[in-house]
Image (cartoon, rainbow, N blue to C red):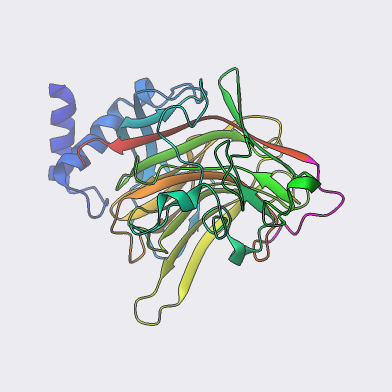
């Protein structure tokens, strides 16, 4: 530990660091983690350790997205983090209290409106996106008040499957005539965090109209900001998007910046997809290797909560399209775990 502190002090004194908006304590943590990188950074990506080190660039961040093929060791360092949230899905996701199966409304939103009656679909789909599913859970009653017992969440051998299936014809009137029933899980009001690393390990389902996602919104209910850690384009097997969204205060215009990445085996093999939110930049990771970053835009001021869902049908998100006869009757979004980490020293 003394040697690590000496190395950090020497690095700071030499003035060679280009990390911006980072306190001396955090910078020392980055440098020390770099010294320990062989011991920390080689963690098995199949696990979610209690401590983690991630490689980040020390180059100044720019507002334009940058795609990384490979980081230069001279202009990068390892950042150490500690785990703050973990779900290995060894039990039903609604049993732990970590998740709720719908979007949250405002403070005046009556609790009963989440579980049934006219208008209860408002927090169980995003109609603006042209989605053709409704998010259900065993308690949800659709237009009625009696729970329908529909459960899109299946757990087997530590893997959660969010299952989308065609709506039974006899239930369509009760379920607002949506073509599919599916599931969403959010941590709003149960877990949110400002800064840190957020990760999902999953397989991405494919098919016409299939839209799996892992993303984040501000816990205060505002939009944007939005961080899309992972969005699958169901029409394009192996294709996924990682995107940042923000609003320009001067005009109110929504801006977005991100990249598509190709993982040919994404539907058949588990991969880690994550985002590191720092004070000065947002960095996206695949299998814990940085693939792109962007300078933190305006408006990223509040803690953010996590959302994981399987939507069906998209009006604006390319590579998804609308469901049709070719869309599988049953689609499964498999999730091995979801984790969050805070940066040591933050």
Residue 37 is situated, as x and y percent measured from the top left of the image, at: 35, 27
Name the dominant secondary structure of the magenta segment.
Answer: loop
Which residue corresponds to the image point at 46% horizontal and 27% vertical from the top-left? 95
Q: Name the quadrant containing residue 82.
A: top left
Residue 332 is situated, as x and y percent measured from the top left of the image, at: 69, 36
Q: Does the magenta stretch include residue 43?
A: no
- Total labels: the figure holds 0
Q: What stretch of residues is rendered in magenta?
A: 318-329
Which residue corresponds to the image point at 51% horizontal and 36% vertical from the top-left? 200
- Name the residue nearer the viewer: 346 or 123: 123
Q: Is residue 292 visible?
A: no
Q: Residue furthest front?
A: 145
Q: Judge from the rendering whether residue 107 lies leftward or rightward of residue 326; answer left or right.
A: left
Specify the quadrant that holds the C terminus: top left
Q: In this view, does 288 lie above or below 207?
A: above
Residue 224 is situated, as x and y percent measured from the top left of the image, at: 42, 64
Which residue corresponds to the image point at 31% horizontal and 44% vertical from the top-left? 193
Q: Judge from the rendering whether residue 149 lies leftward or rightward of residue 105; answer left or right.
A: right
Residue 223 is situated, as x and y percent measured from the top left of the image, at: 42, 64
- Name the residue nearer the viewer: 162 or 71: 162
Q: Is residue 269 above or below residue 299?
A: above
Q: Judge from the rendering whether residue 110 lies leftward or rightward of residue 213; answer left or right.
A: left
Q: Judge from the rendering whether residue 211 lies leftward or rightward of residue 32; answer left or right.
A: right
Specify the quadrant that holds the N terminus: top left
């Amino acid at each position: 530990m003394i040697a690590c502190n000496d190395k950090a002090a020497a690095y700071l004194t030499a003035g060679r660091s280009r990390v911006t908006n980072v306190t001396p304590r955090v910078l020392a943590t980055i440098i020390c983690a770099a010294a320990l990188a062989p011991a920390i950074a080689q963690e098995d990506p199949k696990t979610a350790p209690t401590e983690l080190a991630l490689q980040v660039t020390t180059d100044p961040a720019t507002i334009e997205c940058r795609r990384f093929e490979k980081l230069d060791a001279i202009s990068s360092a390892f950042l150490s983090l500690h785990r703050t949230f973990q779900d290995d899905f060894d039990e039903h996701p609604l049993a732990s209290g970590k998740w709720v199966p719908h979007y949250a409304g405002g403070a005046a939103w009556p609790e009963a409106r989440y579980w049934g009656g006219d208008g209860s679909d408002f927090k169980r789909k995003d109609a603006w996106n042209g989605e053709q599913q409704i998010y259900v859970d065993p308690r949800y009653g659709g237009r009625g008040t009696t729970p329908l017992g529909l459960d899109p969440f299946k757990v087997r051998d530590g893997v959660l499957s969010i299952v989308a299936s065609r709506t039974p014809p006899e239930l369509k009137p009760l379920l607002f005539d949506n073509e599919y029933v599916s599931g969403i899980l959010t941590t709003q009001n149960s877990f949110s965090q400002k800064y840190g690393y957020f990760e999902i390990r999953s397989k991405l389902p494919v098919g016409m109209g299939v839209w799996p996602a892992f993303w984040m919104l501000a816990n205060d209910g505002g939009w944007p900001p939005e961080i899309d850690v992972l969005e699958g384009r169901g029409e394009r097997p192996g294709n996924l998007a990682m995107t940042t969204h923000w609003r320009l205060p001067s005009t109110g215009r929504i801006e977005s910046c991100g990249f598509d990445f190709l993982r040919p085996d994404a539907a058949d093999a588990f991969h880690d997809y994550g985002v590191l939110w720092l004070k000065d930049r947002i960095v996206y990771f695949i299998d814990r290797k940085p693939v792109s970053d962007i300078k933190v835009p305006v408006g990223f001021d509040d803690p953010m909560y996590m959302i994981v869902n399987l939507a069906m049908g998209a009006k604006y998100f390319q590579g998804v399209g609308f469901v049709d006869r070719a869309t599988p009757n049953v689609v499964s979004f498999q999730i091995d775990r979801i984790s969050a980490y805070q940066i040591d020293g933050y």
